[in-house]
Image (tube, rainbow, N blue to C red):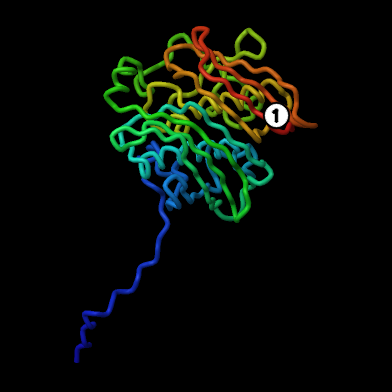
């Protein structure tokens, strides 16, 4: 005797809502493992709630002893949030290019410990100063905050403009890309990792010069995180990493953990021109903390300015 078939009006059991990352193309990443956002809910026309997850072990974005998330992971998460919102919520088609003009974050390093499970995070993002053309955003600002287990751990924001592929090609079409370019005449005799707050030689992005507190930007163009995908200039995260490493080199043999970085990007950092990184001490904000001003120049032209604050160790 065969069982009776289910009645037509009986609905199938609801499937559980499963967690996955957002599409890697929306955050301009080639590797799925480098995507840190998992979802987004629109709360108003310009306000969004995003979710994400930071891994317990990361080859680059963690402290040298493996006990804490790197504060620069906050900046990378903010970068991904801006790109994702532009594509998923503000009408920017895939294939368009982004210019990041500003990026800033503050965080409490004491709240970035790595626990027994991956770190689930919640982000609140507000987009302002949105400019549009033909129904898509051409520029915007965003303000973000990150919570972990309901506790605020970081805040900051950035400013972006968007360039259509044809326009970008006219502007940048003749520039070399990371998969075809070998920097001519620029040595990669990098600083010792311990002198720049790093544990591995491959993560060092600075080479020494004969001038005190001045270095050459010489990242490994095959680095799997800093150069996750092909580009025709040094990514903004490379310049933020140069800021951190220059600050550490300036205060060596001590080191500094960034609790805040504010960066303004003035122009592209070209791959085929030497980029000099300089660091100077600013008046400290409080005891056992340091503030460092960092600049990058190519051909005596300012590329970026950055200010880093953090505790000394």
User: Residue at the location (66% across, 42% down)?
Assistant: 108
**Element type at mark 1:** loop
- Residue labelled with disc 1: 255
Quadrant location of residue 135? top left
Q: Going 60% across and 10% down the picture, which residue do you hit?
A: 209
Residue 253: x %, y % from top left: 73, 24
Above or below — where is 149 with respect to 136? below
Quadrant assignment for the C terminus = top right
| Res. 57 image quadrant | top right
Q: Is residue 176 above or below residue 136?
A: above
- Residue depicted at x 41% and y 31%: 139
Pinpoint residue 293: horizontal percent, then vertical percent. 64, 21
Q: Position of residue 133 (x, y in %)?
A: 31, 32
Report the residue that reaches farthest toward the right.
287
Answer with left or right where residue 149 lies relative to residue 126: right
Marker count (numbered): 1
Quadrant of the rendering where the N terminus is positioned: bottom left
| Depth order, front residue of 304/276 | 304
Viewer-proximal residue among 197 and 81: 81
Q: Position of residue 72 (x, y in %)?
A: 57, 35
Closer to us: 261 or 272: 261
């Amino acid at each position: 005797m065969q069982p009776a078939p289910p009645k037509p009006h009986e609905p199938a059991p609801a499937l559980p809502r499963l967690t996955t990352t957002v599409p890697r193309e929306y955050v301009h990443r080639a590797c799925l493992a480098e995507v840190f956002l998992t979802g987004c809910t629109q709360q108003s026309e310009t306000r969004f709630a995003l979710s994400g997850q930071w891994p317990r072990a990361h080859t680059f974005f963690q402290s040298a002893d493996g006990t804490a998330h790197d504060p620069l992971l906050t900046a990378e998460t903010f970068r991904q949030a801006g790109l994702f919102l532009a594509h998923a919520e503000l009408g920017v088609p895939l294939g368009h290019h982004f210019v990041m003009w500003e990026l800033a974050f503050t965080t409490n390093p004491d709240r970035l410990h790595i626990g027994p499970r991956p770190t689930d995070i919640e982000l609140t993002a507000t987009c302002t100063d949105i400019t549009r053309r033909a129904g898509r955003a051409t520029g915007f600002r965003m303000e973000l905050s990150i919570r972990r287990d309901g506790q605020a751990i970081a805040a900051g924001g950035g400013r972006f403009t968007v360039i259509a592929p044809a326009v970008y090609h006219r502007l940048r079409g003749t520039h070399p890309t990371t998969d075809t370019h070998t920097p001519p005449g620029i040595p990669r005799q990098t600083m010792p990792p311990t002198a720049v707050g790093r544990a591995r030689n491959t993560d060092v992005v600075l080479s020494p010069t004969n001038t005190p507190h001045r270095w050459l930007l010489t990242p490994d163009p095959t680095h799997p995180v800093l150069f996750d995908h092909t580009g025709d200039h040094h990514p903004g995260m490379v310049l933020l990493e140069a800021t951190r490493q220059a600050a550490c080199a300036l205060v060596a043999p001590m080191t500094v953990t960034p609790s805040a970085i504010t960066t303004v990007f003035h122009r592209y950092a070209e791959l085929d021109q030497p980029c000099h990184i300089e660091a100077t001490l600013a008046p400290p904000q409080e005891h056992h903390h340091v503030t460092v001003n960092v600049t990058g120049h190519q051909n005596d032209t300012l590329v970026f300015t950055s200010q880093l604050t953090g505790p000394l160790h």
